[in-house]
Amino acid sequence: MKRLVFAISFLYFSVLSCTKDQVPPREKCTDAVTYEDIEFLIERSCATSGCHDGSSGYGDYHNFEGMKTDIANGGFEAEVILNGTMPKDDTLSTEEFRLFQCWVDNGYLEE
């Protein structure tokens, strides 16, 4: 009986504590990162066969023009920064992720 009371109490307080957790908003990056600064990273991580290579139907990230639709509709930011679901077959280092984050935070500077 003591175990049951303990288990129920533990679950109750666990659920309550989860509802109070707040994730602080991330700080915006102020470093000016341009497309030219991350072009090598996009070529390696995004503009690959079966992904954003222009022939797969997911857009062509071989140049800035080809990315404009996903930039405008928020797809790039959602998949790479917010959800972390892209790049699909590549892992970004902390520094590479930061470069993408700075690029997004500063309005996707082309040059």
Image (cartoon, rainbow, N blue to C red):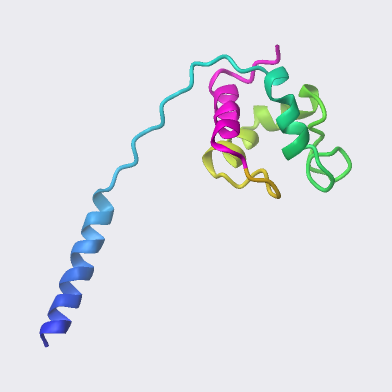
Position of residue 3 relative to residue 71, above or below, is below
Seen in the image, is 54 located left or right of residue 99? Answer: right
Residue 24: image location, x then y, percent: 34, 36
Residue 14: image location, x then y, percent: 23, 62
Q: Look at 66% across and 17% down and name the residue there.
A: 34
Q: Which of the 4 quarters of the picture holds residue 65?
A: top right
Quadrant (top left, top right, bottom left, bottom right) of the C terminus: top right
Seen in the image, is 51 located left or right of residue 99? Answer: right
Give the farthest residue toward the left: 2
Does residue 68 appear anywhere in the picture?
Answer: yes
Along the viewing direction, whichever of 49 and 21 lies nearer the viewer: 49
Q: Look at 84% across and 45% down and name the residue there.
A: 49
Q: Main secondary structure of the magenta part?
A: helix
Q: Which of the 4 quarters of the picture holds residue 48?
A: top right
Give the farthest residue toward the bottom: 1
Q: How many marks?
A: 0
Does residue 46 appear anywhere in the picture?
Answer: no
Q: Look at 25% across and 62% down and name the residue there.
A: 15
The magenta stretch is 92-111
Quadrant (top left, top right, bottom left, bottom right) of the N terminus: bottom left
Residue 56: image location, x then y, percent: 85, 46
Residue 76: image location, x then y, percent: 64, 35
Position of residue 111 relative to residue 50, above or below, is above
Seen in the image, is 89 located left or right of residue 81? Answer: right
Q: Look at 71% across and 50% down and name the residue there.
A: 89
Q: Is residue 62 magenta?
A: no
Give the farthest residue toward the top: 111
